[in-house]
Image (cartoon, rainbow, N blue to C red):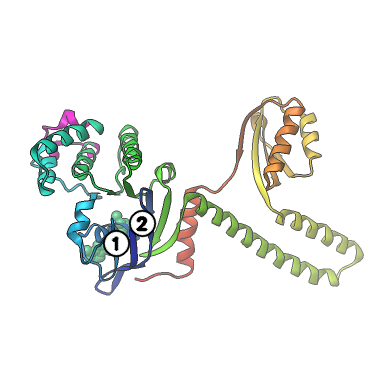
Amino acid sequence: MKYAIETFDLTKKYDEFTAVDALNMKIDNNSIFGFLGPNGAGKTTTIKMLTCLIKATSGTGNVAGYDITNNPNEVREKIGMVPQLVSLYGDLTVRENVYLCADFYGLPTDLKISRADELMELVDIKYAQNKLVKQLSGGMKQKASVVASLIHQPDILFLDEPTIGLDPTTKRVLWDLVEELNSEGRTIILCSHDMYEVELLCDGIGIINNGVLAAFDTPRGLKDTMIKEQKELKSTKDSNVIKIMEELRKESSVEDSAAFDKIKENIEIRNRDLKELSVMISNLDENMLNHLNKLPSIHEIVEHDSGRIVMDIESSDESVNQIISAIITNGGNITSIATKDPSLEDVFMSVTAKKEEEGVDNE
Ligand SMILES: Nc1ncnc2c1ncn2[C@@H]1O[C@H](COP(=O)(O)OP(=O)(O)O)[C@@H](O)[C@H]1O
Ligand SMILES: [Mg+2]
């Protein structure tokens, strides 16, 4: 089985309102998949259909090799789910809740006890095993919910915004657990708003907006697409400016046309494949700046406080090599280097804003 999950025009309507609109996704087996989207985008609705809690209006999906419409019981055996709102019994203890889940899956008593112990230790909740769930803090409830969802050792684990409102230590425990479960061969579907979390954990990402899948790629692929689109946009804008300038130039004096040529040349340089390189040099001086200004791969240098310079450079590995070697050869002491790529947050904002501009709105 290559895919843990495949959906085929998966759709959910509430009366006239389409909450999830013809979703087609393929999620690799043994991956950590991040499912992102603004509030109300359709993440929880999708997860509920895939975990057979609600029925799709049309379309369907395969989860762990079983069809969610025709084989929901087989699907339920293979999956675990940590819902957005913890759904444990408040008047039962942590251990009692975990046992209840184990009984639901028909686990023999010895296995039920040993796994409950093991999992409670793993997420560090065993100390509260005899407390009523209603007496627990948010983080403790979330941990108890995770233990309950893992008791039958599911192949696929769905986590719906599992770390929202948790303290950094508890978050870290859950992140470590996700990585550990994945290294054991399980697939994790993680709904999240936390870009740091997604970037840290996920191999693949789907961004859903207004029920429509707006982007689907690896984190690197999403960023590369964004860089490419930004370049194309800039290039279109610049060529429009050049066209207008050429028109103006026809009617201008000799002096003015020389100025036009200079501006055009600058735009063309700017339009080349450039990227930003930021370097901190503890002993930066005029001499160093003069050396750097002579390098053809650097188009602009802006000096900041404490020896930091930000350069627009030719976008190639050789140019980075050349610049760094030049700094070192001239006695520069480099304390940090960074190139600027868009963050996952930039991608998220751009993808969700773009779809709104295009008028993808099903309300
Ligand atoms: N039972 C329901 N009846 C009507 N509308 C619903 C129901 N459940 C969810 N919705 C609507 O479907 C949309 C998607 O909701 P949801 O999947 O919970 O979004 P997300 O999890 O991405 O925040 C929202 O507009 C929500 O109001
Ligand atoms: Mg939700």
What's under tag 1, amino acid-wise? Asn
Q: Name the residue under label 2.
A: 3
Q: Give yes or no for residue 135 being in the magenta stretch.
A: yes
Q: Earlier in the sequence, mark 1 or mark 2?
A: 2
Image location of residue 263, percent across then percent down = 79, 58
User: Is residue 300 among the parts visible in the rendering?
Assistant: yes
User: Is residue 82 among the parts visible in the rendering?
Assistant: no
- Residue 119 higher or lower than 343, as above or below: above
Most extreme residue toward the bottom is 16
What's under tag 2, amino acid-wise? Tyr
Q: How far apart are marks 1 and 2 (CA)?
A: 9 Å
For label 2, the crowd category at 10 Å Cα-Cα, with few meaning under 14, some 14 to 19 and many 20 or more, is some
Q: Is mark 1 on a helix, strand or loop?
A: strand
Which residue corresponds to the image point at 30% horizontal and 34% vertical from the top-left? 170
For label 1, the crowd category at 10 Å Cα-Cα, with few meaning under 14, some 14 to 19 and many 20 or more, is many
| Residue 62 numbered mark, or none | 1
Q: What element carries label 2?
A: strand
Image location of residue 302, percent across then percent down = 70, 40
Quarter-of-image position of residue 111: top left
- Residue stretch rendered in magenta on the structure: 123-139
Most extreme residue toward the front is 1
Image location of residue 117, percent across then percent down = 17, 32
Picture quarter with the N terminus = bottom left
| Residue 230 numbered mark, or none | none
Disc 1 + disc 2, Cβ < 8 Å: yes
Q: Give yes or no for residue 171 being in the magenta stretch.
A: no
- Residue 185 higher or lower than 24, as above or below: above
Q: Which image quadrant shows ligand 1?
A: bottom left
Q: Could you tell whether 200 is left or right of 225 in the image?
A: left
Image location of residue 74, percent across then percent down = 19, 57
Picture quarter with the C terminus = bottom left
